[in-house]
Image (tube, rainbow, N blue to C red):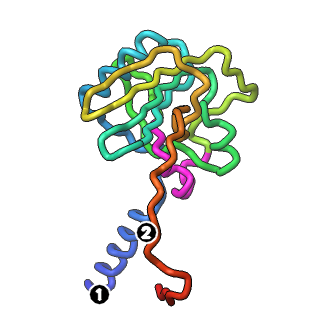
Amino acid sequence: MKKQYLTLILFVFAIYSCVAHKTPYKLELKKELKQVIDSFTNKYENFQFYELYIDKTTPYNLTLILFGGDNSLMEQENSDYNQQPIVYMLSSNNKRVYIYSGIERYVLNSFGNSVKRNKVRNYSNSICWMIEDSFNTFSTIDSICGRYPFFPLPMKFIPPPMIEDSVQENDNLSF
């Protein structure tokens, strides 16, 4: 009889632990980044949406976009792919800042419609800060809008050097 109760308790625990959360997870960010976000949300405190996009561009460099507006910057993409931000942080003035990293597309949306959406998209009342993090040194460019997350910044294209291939046509390659 004790064995059946123990099995039942373990079964209930297993089911409970598999139940999806209904809201994104709250994170605490490192002090340096939190200060930048706090500055942003304090300066622009009347927006409905605050979002942080994190894009690792090289092993030591990250491009971050801090967005504030009346609509989510990725509202259409979120709708098209049934994706939601997975995590958020609270700023010092208690604004919820949703954090995107690109993984949202590959995680099942268990939050439903926990992030409110506006029926009319209006990006005229929005602001972006682009933050470059290079070796833990932040540099911020104020008021850059029109930059869509997870796309490289325009730069001069430098073609890679030509590398002569040592494989000849008649070589049999097996993988």
134 relative position to 127: left or right: left
Instruction: Give the amino acid type for the residue marked by disc 2 in the picture.
Output: Ile
Label 2: element kind: helix
Residue 110 is labelled as: none
Residue 15 is labelled as: 2
Instruction: Give the amino acid type for the residue marked by disc 1 in the picture.
Output: Met
Q: Which residue is drawn at 54% across and 88% down?
A: 170
Q: What stretch is highlighted in magenta?
A: 99-112
Q: Which of 173 and 67 is in front in this view?
A: 173
119 relative position to 90: left or right: right
Residue 156 placement (x, y as % from top left): 53, 34
Residue named by callout 1:
1
Q: Assess disc 1: are there few (<14), some (14-19) or many (≥20) residues with their C-alpha within 10 Å of its C-alpha.
A: few
| Mark toward the viewer: 1 or 2 | 2
Considering only vertical position in the picture, is 126 above or below 76? above
Q: Assess disc 2: are there few (<14), some (14-19) or many (≥20) residues with their C-alpha within 10 Å of its C-alpha.
A: few
Q: Is residue 151 magenta?
A: no
- Badge 1 or badge 2: first in the primary sequence: 1
Residue 119 placement (x, y as % from top left): 74, 29
Considering only vertical position in the picture, is 67 above or below 84? above
Q: Residue at x 72, y 26 (%)?
A: 121
Residue 112 placement (x, y as % from top left): 60, 48
What is the spatial separation of the Cα atoms under label 1 and label 2, in whole angstroms?
21 Å
Q: How many marks are shown on the rendered structure?
A: 2
Considering only vertical position in the picture, is 150 above or below 170? above
Are the residues tagged 1 and 2 within 8 Å (C-beta)? no
- Quarter occupied by the N terminus: bottom left
Label 1: element kind: loop
Q: Which residue is drawn at 50% across and 41% down?
A: 158
Q: Which residue is drawn at 63% across and 26% down?
A: 71
Q: Residue 60 is drawn in which quadrant?
A: top left
Residue 162 placement (x, y as % from top left): 47, 57
